[in-house]
Image: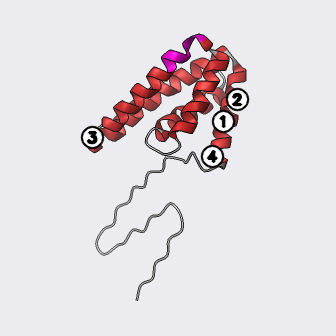
Amino acid sequence: MDPALITLASAGGTAVVSAMATDGWDTLRSGVVALWQRFRPGSTTELERELETSRSALLATPDTDIDQARQALQSAWQGRILTLFLEDRAAAAEFEALLSKLTESGQLKANITFNAEARDQGRVYQANGNQFISER
């Protein structure tokens, strides 16, 4: 199996699930549905139902379980996307173009997780962007 297809499917599954709770959801959803319509037209209705079911489940998940739910959904969508790529490699190129377009337009952002631990009198400063710290 082509490692590039696996990597792209992994990024795709992550992007689909990450977008579910953002303003970029409608755009990503439309792009994925259009891709399926082009390469697997007979399963588009089922795909749309699965996308909405996944999104509803994610949004209804309590904060304490969100990481597990997100990981499970990402795995499921990675599998669906990889299956599409294996059936038709042209779908992979189009999907990659969709992800690039959404990333460049700012509608799709990486899912970033920060972890830190401060001990004694240590401090932790984390940011996903500009950070200005003024201590006096």
Q: Which residue is mark 2?
A: 94
Looking at the rendered structure, the kind of residue marked 2 is: Glu
Q: Residue at x 31, y 36 (%)?
A: 60
Residue 1 belongs to magenta span: no
Q: Disc 2 on helix, strand or loop?
A: helix
Q: Quadrant of residue 66?
A: top left
Q: Is residue 60 above or below residue 53?
A: below
Give how far across and how far down residue 6 sits, in percent: 60, 28
Residues at marks 1 and 4 touching, judged by CB atoms closer than 8 Å = no
What secondary structure is the stretch in magenta mostly built from? helix
The stretch of residues the image draws in magenta is 42-47
Q: Quadrant of the N terminus?
A: top right
Badge 1 or badge 3: first in the primary sequence: 3
For residue 62, the mark is 3
Residue projecting furthest to the top:
42
Q: Which residue is mark 4?
A: 103
Residue at mark 2 to residue at mark 1: CA–CA distance: 6 Å
